[in-house]
Image (cartoon, rainbow, N blue to C red):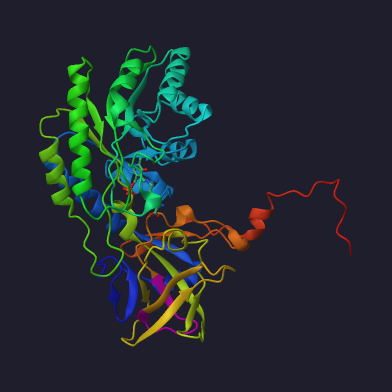
């Protein structure tokens, strides 16, 4: 299994820290990340791309925006891919240079564009022509030149879940590749804008690199066309990372194969290749530690009711995603069960009829592969606490995000004084 969450003396650890210790000291549910796992993936992604030449690696902050996680990646030489002003401020707060930050996103507001210009953002990934005109004018007004690339929609089906597919013509992202040349020509000469490249992204959790190869080949043609039309192209953003294994036995693309494919397809481009990996760097570096509240008899299978819920880990409810469930003190015994949280929705179910480690009330368990799109998508639905996060390194750990209690959340709410006092 995952070497970063080993079973030592019968108990699951994060690196060298026993998970029951974290449960006792921090409580559950809690996200736990392994520094070693993040570092290893960061290095493996970079090493895989080595044959491809000049690269710029920008961690997709949306997958895990925790400041400590960002610092780990900054120390590995990663910049950031941000999709909001908030994510940009996080990148800066974590110590990432503004120059190393790429701003993606189909709905950047004028306020966000202004913030990014004022703080020296490295690259804007433009999603539509009007955004380019507005950005150019805003930069010119400030006496600045915004570095930008044009995101194109290559119309390729990435073969992933429909809700995380981004590169089909009907998706909201990028400009149609067929119109890219014309739009490029209208934006390229604007004062305030330095447009020197193109970008693409076709989806997340890709388990097959063939659609990426098709996409990159189309990008290569576009680069050649733009150069033939006289434009300087010195950077091409090739999007996010590849998928990770969620199910036992699932085999994701190897990073070396991916890198070799990139090197082969882009061999003659002579540009800086940019990447925005998220999940592949942090997905398997995190687990969600939870306690079994009850094992409730069910009509077909028992329900293992855990103290983590859809508000803490939304992926199963949103995308029917599979997260492996494992006992912290496995005995070897197995059971077939449904796994559900306390939230008052039938959709608050992590698994149905699954063969799992046998557990009983009070036992600890983990939902694996929760390091990406886990805590960041948490909410306080049902007035539950916002889930905390812990970072482990060797035999040390630190709480890197507090549990935010419901009373802290509703302290920011107001009852206007023109409402009648509660009847007593
Ligand atoms: N760049 C862009 C422009 C993106 O839209 C995304 C992800 C990434 C990079 C990072 O992709 P990655 O390397 O993580 O595959 N919440 C969903 C995932 C949404 C991903 C959206 N875009 C989930 O939990 O599966």
Residue drawn at point x = 14 percent, y = 27 percent: 270
Residue drawn at point x = 38 percent, y = 50 percent: 164
Q: Quadrant of the C terminus?
A: bottom right
Q: Quadrant of residue 276?
A: top left
Q: Nearer the viewer, residue 83 or 91?
A: 83
Q: Is residue 362 magenta?
A: yes
Q: Which residues are magenta?
A: 355-366
Q: Quadrant of residue 273?
A: top left
- Residue 325: percent from left, percent from top: 37, 73
- Residue 114: percent from left, percent from top: 49, 25
Position of 280 compared to 344: left or right?
Answer: left
311 shown above or below 248: above
Count the marks: 0
Q: Quadrant of the N terminus?
A: bottom left
Q: Nearer the viewer, residue 386 or 257?
A: 257
Position of 138 compared to 127: left or right?
Answer: right
222 shown above or below 257: above
Q: Nearer the viewer, residue 282 or 216?
A: 216
- Residue 291: percent from left, percent from top: 48, 75
Residue drawn at point x = 51 percent, y = 30 percent: 109
Q: Is residue 156 magenta?
A: no
């Amino acid at each position: 299994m995952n070497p970063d969450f080993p079973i030592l003396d019968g108990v699951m650890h994060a690196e060298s820290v026993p998970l029951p210790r974290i449960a006792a000291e921090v409580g559950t549910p809690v996200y736990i990340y392994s520094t070693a796992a993040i570092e290893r993936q960061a290095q493996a992604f970079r090493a895989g791309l080595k044959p491809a030449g000049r690269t710029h690696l920008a961690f997709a902050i949306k997958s895990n925006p925790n400041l400590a996680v960002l610092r780990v990646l900054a120390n590995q030489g990663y910049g950031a891919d941000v999709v909001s002003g908030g994510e940009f401020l996080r990148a800066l707060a974590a110590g990432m240079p503004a120059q190393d930050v790429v701003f993606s996103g189909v709905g950047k507001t004028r306020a966000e564009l202004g913030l990014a210009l004022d703080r020296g953002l490295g690259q804007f990934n433009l999603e539509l022509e009007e955004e380019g005109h507005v950005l150019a004018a805003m930069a010119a007004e400030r006496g600045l030149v915004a570095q930008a690339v044009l995101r194109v929609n290559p119309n390729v089906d990435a073969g992933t879940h429909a809700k995380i597919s981004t590169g089909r013509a009907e998706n909201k992202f990028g400009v149609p590749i067929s119109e890219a040349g014309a739009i490029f020509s209208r934006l390229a000469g604007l004062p305030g804008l330095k447009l020197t490249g193109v970008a693409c992204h076709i989806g997340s959790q890709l388990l097959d690199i063939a659609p990426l190869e098709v996409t990159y080949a189309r990008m290569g043609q576009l680069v050649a066309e733009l150069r033939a039309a006289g434009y300087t192209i010195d950077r091409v953003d090739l999007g996010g990372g590849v998928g990770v294994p969620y199910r036992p036995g699932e085999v994701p693309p190897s990073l070396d194969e991916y890198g070799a494919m990139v090197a082969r397809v882009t061999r003659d481009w002579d540009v800086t290749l940019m990447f925005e990996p998220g999940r592949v760097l942090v997905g398997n570096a995190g687990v969600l530690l939870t306690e079994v509240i009850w094992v409730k008899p069910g009509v077909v299978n028992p329900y293992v009711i855990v103290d983590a819920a859809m508000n803490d880990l939304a992926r199963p409810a949103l995308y029917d995603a599979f997260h492996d469930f494992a006992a912290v003190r496995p005995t070897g015994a197995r059971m077939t069960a449904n796994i559900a949280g306390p939230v008052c929705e039938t959709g608050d179910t992590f698994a149905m009829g699954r063969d799992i480690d046998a557990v009983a009330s009070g036992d600890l368990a983990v939902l694996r592969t929760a390091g990406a799109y886990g805590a960041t998508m948490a909410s306080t639905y049902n007035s539950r606490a916002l889930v905390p996060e812990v970072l482990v390194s060797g035999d040390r750990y630190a709480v890197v995000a507090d549990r935010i209690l419901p009373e802290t959340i509703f302290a920011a709410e107001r009852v206007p004084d023109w409402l009648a006092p509660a009847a007593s």
